[in-house]
Image (cartoon, coloured by chain):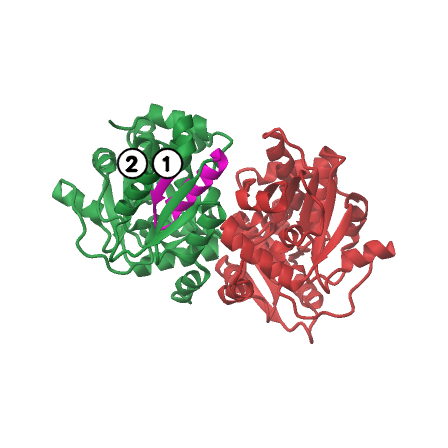
Chain colours: A red, B green
């Protein structure tokens, strides 16, 4: 089982007029700062403020009548939660989301406002997988994985397909792609699309410090799991290990993985506020952080950059801005 | 002298591949809240974070060689300042901007970073018009008005032209247009384009409380000037009276003017943060504020909404967010 460009094209058909075709943005300040032609794909402007709606809708829209009646269950710290909740609402089927107690308030509230039932759990003492399995066993609900699923990956890949098509409409081709990387679903989908259509592109996944399971796995030549889970602003990128399917894709499609510090992340959030006028959550800003921190030499290149989400609480957002008063 | 669709089309040619063709965005939460199909034109994503670059570049790019050498001078609290500064930088001509001491820090810094010379003045004791006239007399520089100029208006009108064309590409036509209104340049340009191409559209200009000179002028049937200038968040919309040329246009093209309170404005800034993931400055959010406050019945209609700018200091932004903890 893998994911191909054809799967992604089928997903794009399902998402047509349902998901937002997010624009490809340019910014004078960013280009001048970086010395490259940077094309920003702002998935914070997607429904529910993150790319996760793409995969969730692609998955849920393929459930049969019986499955739809039994509904879905998912676990997520917030963006997958909202993606599943909105897809379920649009398709008129019940959704239960298992969320950690410490999920950002905005993510929890939005999930509830979209009509999903939220079941909270404690990260330290409970297993979200076990809770979801119990709910599925009792109700017959379908479990919707956050990333390790071909339909989820294909849905997220529509973001990458759009990038290539939108660049082509401007007579451009991506020479570099930078994407945030948590469980690796967005990266697996987008790298599949970009690798198929622009074989020479360099593709980078970006992780926050201490959550560099992909970078570690790449160095080891096999999947590696994290042992420690320190606090991070990047709640969206706290996956403990690469997915089985996502890793099988990313190990082939991705050029390398980059790691950014918490301060580099808050700088990127602040830069997006000041110059891009976009609200980007820390986990959604890691690829921009890598670019601004000079992790790659991109001088004169055509760079595509994914800002994957914008669901950040107001006080956390202001904390990021205050950290960089001179920006 | 007036401005026609033809002037706007010529401006669009000059701005091609120079200005950003800002996208037309949809948002699930906004549509559901308003009960309409709302198309958001986020000019905060334009170069310099506001529509003002359009008019400035359209004006400056038509200067002859002698005029270019002598440069330009403008007065502005900030967005026109940055628009002129960037246009001058791109066209390689010197620019001096006369700005009030109390302009938002971000607007002043960005203007300087774009290479313009900034001359500060005190609103209470100095005349910015006199200062600009002195600079022009001494240097031969061309004065670039902020709104009361046919080329400036035509440039801003490209925003309205894009709205109509982007809607047409989706098989839609604007039934309503809501635009912020300060001196009336954006509104005059956009209403000219929309009125010409969609004659049946209802067009509304939106002003902040105490700066309702257009609403007063409409009621009086002639241009009225403000007598009092209380503090407002909407620094971009503090024009004391409608322009001569802009009023001559707007009195014919605009259906009516709406007025929103400071609290309605901060609510809109907060809504844009939470649901649209856009950074919108208070003055740029007044049209959204009118919509969210229910000033118009737009049920079931196709509504185009301009968010005109996003240059807001971080603390002012956070103050807006904190005012509405339950949003």
Which of the 4 image quarters holds residue B300? Answer: top left
Magenta stretch, residue numbers: B71-92
- For the residues labelled 2 and 1, say whether their Cβ atoms are less than 8 Å apart: yes
Which quarter shows the N terminus of chain A?
top right
Extreme residue in the right direction: A221
In this view of the protein, which residue sits in the foreground, B115 or B15?
A: B115
| Occupied quadrant, residue B10 | top left
Whichever of labels 2 and 1 marks the residue nearer the N terminus, that label is 1
Viewport quadrant of the C terminus of chain A = bottom right
Measured as percent of width and height from the top left, residue A9 is found at 66, 36
Kind of element beneath mark 2: helix
Instruction: Locate residue A145 relative to residue B285 in the image: left or right.
Output: right
Callout 2: 10 Å neighbours few (<14), some, many (20+)?
Answer: many
Observer-nearest of B246 and B323: B246
Q: Mark 2 lies on which chain?
A: B
Query: Is residue B78 part of the magenta span, yes or no?
Result: yes
How far from the left and from the top, in percent, is residue B16?
48, 29
Question: Which numbered disc covers residue B188?
Answer: 2
Q: Can residue B41 be seen in this view?
A: no
Q: Distance between the residues labelled 2 and 1?
A: 8 Å
In the rendered image, which residue does mark 1 sit on?
A: B156
User: How far from the left and from the top, in percent, is residue B205?
Assistant: 28, 43
Above or below for A86 versus A107: above
In this view, the residue farthest toward the front is B138
Q: Which residue is pictured at 29% across the width and 34% down the height? A: B149
- Is any atom of residue B139 visible in this view? yes
What residue lies at 39% left-to-right and 62% top-to-bottom?
B320
Q: Mark 1 lies on which chain?
A: B
């Amino acid at each position: 089982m893998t994911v191909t460009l054809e799967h992604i094209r089928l997903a794009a058909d399902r998402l047509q007029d349902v998901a937002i075709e997010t624009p490809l943005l340019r910014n004078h300040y960013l280009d001048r700062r970086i010395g490259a032609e940077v094309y920003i794909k702002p998935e914070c402007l997607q429904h529910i403020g993150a790319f996760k709606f793409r995969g969730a809708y692609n998955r849920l829209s393929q459930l049969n009548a019986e499955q739809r009646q039994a509904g879905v269950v998912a676990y997520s710290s917030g963006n997958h939660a909202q993606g599943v909740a909105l897809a379920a609402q649009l398709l008129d089927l019940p959704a239960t989301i298992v969320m950690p107690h410490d999920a950002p308030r905005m993510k929890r509230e939005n999930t509830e406002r979209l009509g999903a039932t939220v079941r909270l759990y404690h990260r330290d003492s409970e297993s979200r997988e076990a809770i979801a399995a119990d709910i599925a066993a009792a109700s017959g609900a379908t479990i919707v994985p956050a990333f390790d699923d071909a339909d989820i990956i294909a849905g997220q890949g529509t973001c990458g397909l759009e990038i290539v098509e939108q660049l082509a409409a401007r007579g451009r081709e991506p020479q570099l792609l930078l994407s945030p990387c948590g469980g690796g679903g967005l990266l697996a989908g987008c790298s599949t699309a970009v690798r198929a259509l622009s074989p020479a592109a360099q593709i980078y996944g970006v992780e926050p410090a201490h959550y560099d399971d992909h970078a570690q796995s790449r160095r080891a030549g096999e999947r590696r799991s994290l042992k420690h889970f320190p606090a991070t602003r990047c709640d969206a990128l706290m996956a403990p290990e690469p997915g089985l399917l996502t890793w099988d894709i990313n190990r082939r499609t991705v050029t390398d993985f980059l790691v950014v510090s918490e301060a580099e992340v808050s700088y990127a959030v602040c830069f997006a506020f000041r110059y891009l006028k976009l609200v980007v959550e820390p986990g959604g800003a890691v690829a921009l952080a890598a670019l601004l921190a000079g992790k790659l030499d991109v001088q004169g290149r055509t760079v595509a950059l994914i800002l994957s989400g914008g669901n950040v609480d107001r006080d956390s957002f202001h904390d990021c801005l205050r950290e960089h008063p001179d920006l």
